Structures are given as C-alpha cells and as structure tokens.
Amino acid sequence: MNPVERNASASAVQAGSSAMARLITVALCTHNHRDRLIKTLQNLRALGLPKSSTELLVVDNASTDGTTELLAAGHWRRPDWPTRVVREEKLGLSNARNRVIHEAAGEYIVFMDDDETPDTSWLVSYDRAIARHRPDALGGRIEVMFEEGDRPKWLTDEILAFVGKLDHGSGERLLNDRSTPIFGGNFGFHREIFARIGNFDAALGRRGSANIGGEDTEIYRRMIEMDCKVLWVPDAVIYHRIQTTKLRRSYFLDLHFRQGRVEGMRKRGQQSRFPPRYLLPQLLRAVRAVWEQWRRDGRRSALRKEMNVAYFVGYILGWAFDGESRT
C-alpha cells in the first residue's frame, strides 16, 4: 500500500469511527395536538435511520388533551430506536425546545413539529451533511401537504411561507443572509452552539393558543450576526400537513398582529411610549395599498397587504402599551 492509499484508508477508518460515535437527537415538541401527533408518530416508523446512533426525544409541553396518556401508552415506539419522553410544564414552544437542549444526549439536535411527516431519507440526509461539513446549524426544505380539501384560492404562493413552506434551492450551501432563514419545523444545531448564542427566546414562539411566532428566525439572525456556519440541506425534506378546513384568513392577520406587538415592544426598549412619528405614515401607506387592491381586484385579493396593516397596528400598540419602560 502506497502512502496516499494508506492515508486515504486511515481517513476512511477515522470518518467511519466518527460516524458511529456521533449521536443525533431528533426532538419532537408537542402541545395538545393528540390527533395530529398520532399520525406523526405513525409516520416516524417508516423513517430511515442513519449509520450514526440516534435517539428520539419527545417533549410533552403541558398537554391536557390526552397527549400525555398517548405517549405513556408506548405502543407507538419503534423497537430499533431509543426513545424518551419528558414533560415540560412551562407552556411555550421555546420553553419546550430549551428543555430539549437540557435533556438531549446528541451532539446534534434536529427539531421537527408534531404535525409533520418527514421524507424517509430525511434523517439520513442530515447525517450525511453533518459528516461532510460539521456545521454549527443546518436546515432543510419544508413542503406543504394539504389534507381534507384543496388549497384555498386566496392562499397565494407568497403566503405559503407563513404556513411553513421553505425552499432555498437545490444545492447544499452556507446561509449567511438574514433573508434566508431556516424554520423551526426542520432545523438542527450542534448542541455546543447554544453556549455561544444562548437558548431560544421564551418570549417568542407559540404558547398554547397564542398565535406567536418568530423564535426560529430570531435565533437564526443571532447565528448570522455571530458568523456561525449555517448549512442549507435541500435533501432533508419534511412535509407540513395542513388541515385545509381549518385554514382561516384571520389566522394570518392575528399572527402578524401579535408579531408586530412583540417587535414594537422590543424596539422601544427603554424609550418613551409615544410611538415614533414615522410609524403612522407607514401604517397609512399600508392601508392605502389594501384599499387600492380591493378596488382593483376585490376584497379577497389583498391578504398579504392586510397582513402588513395588522403588523403595523400591532407594532404601534406594542410600542405604546406592552412591557415596561422609563418615561
């Protein structure tokens, strides 16, 4: 064996040993989604497992709808996949994810939601990407799967991102721009990264029926600001199952209103509660844009612009009334 072959062989053995030693924790956080969770757990039985050792960690986030009993029954567990269930009493998706960080045994933690179906090669794709690149964080493609009916006509392509759809292209690449976030329904982290950037922001993310988001994009922006290595893995595909019969325009308006309140309060900080003068013209321009599209294309054509109005209204109210400040 020549020196080049010997070095290549040694590298292959080292890589193989590393793959066997690495542990990936798949984290599934759930709250009062028993019926949706049943299908997710069933679908996980078809998931291909990688060469690396893995575990499934399910966090029951203060559920009261029978989810706790379902998880305790244990019939859904795969015999070939080490699985643990823990309960987090502090309500909130970010609290549940922070519990994962505390509990996970894996060097890498990969998150999914309780209403999703992973492609059978989802975890294998992540495992391969980790072996090749050793990123600080990574995210994959999210497709939307409509159930119980067809996609509503008013749900345009530009709104699909707000029900989880995500696609940054077909090739693996590093993400380093605020406009290319990774979403909480399909992302992962080297566990040591949280010591650098901090945990998920508990003020953001869904809490029970409170329609609040933004925790995933907020932590992504922190990583970008700290020059973390964030990898896009397009082959790690997951499907977000949408119950078409439950889709309402009001969901999107409420989501943006609440997000505006949170961001307005945070932007104000310790400043005066009187909103800056520039906010009112922005709101008026947003209202005018809605009115013009209504006149041109009808009342059901302007949802995306209506969402902007809801955001600005929430932002102004959050600035003026939420949180504490010195006046």
Image (cartoon, rainbow, N blue to C red):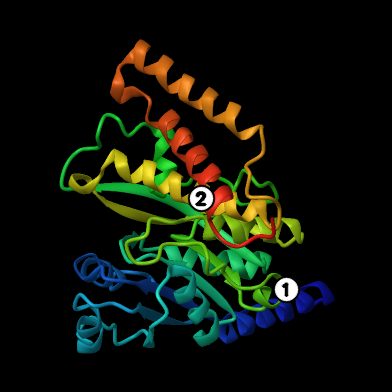
Image quadrant holding the N terminus, namely bottom right
Query: Where residue 243 is drawn, which disc sits there?
Result: none
3 or 267: which is nearer to us?
A: 267
| Mark toward the start of the polypeptide (1 vs 2) | 1
User: Does residue 295 appear left or right of residue 226 in this picture?
Assistant: left
- Residue 254 placement (x, y as % from top left): 37, 46
| Residue at the (47%, 20%) spot, across then down | 289
**Left or right: residue 78 compared with residue 11:** left
Q: Which residue is mark 1?
A: 196
Nearest the viewer among 230 and 245 is 245
Looking at the image, residue 165 lies above or below residue 233: above
Residue at position x 54%, y 23% in the image: 285
Query: What secondary structure is marked by label 1?
Result: helix
Label 1, label 2: how far apart the Cα atoms are: 28 Å
Rendering quarter of residue 47: bottom left
Which amino acid is tagged 1?
Arg
Q: Which of pointers 1 and 2 indicates the residue nearer the eye?
A: 2
**x and y percent of residue 321 in the render?**
53, 53
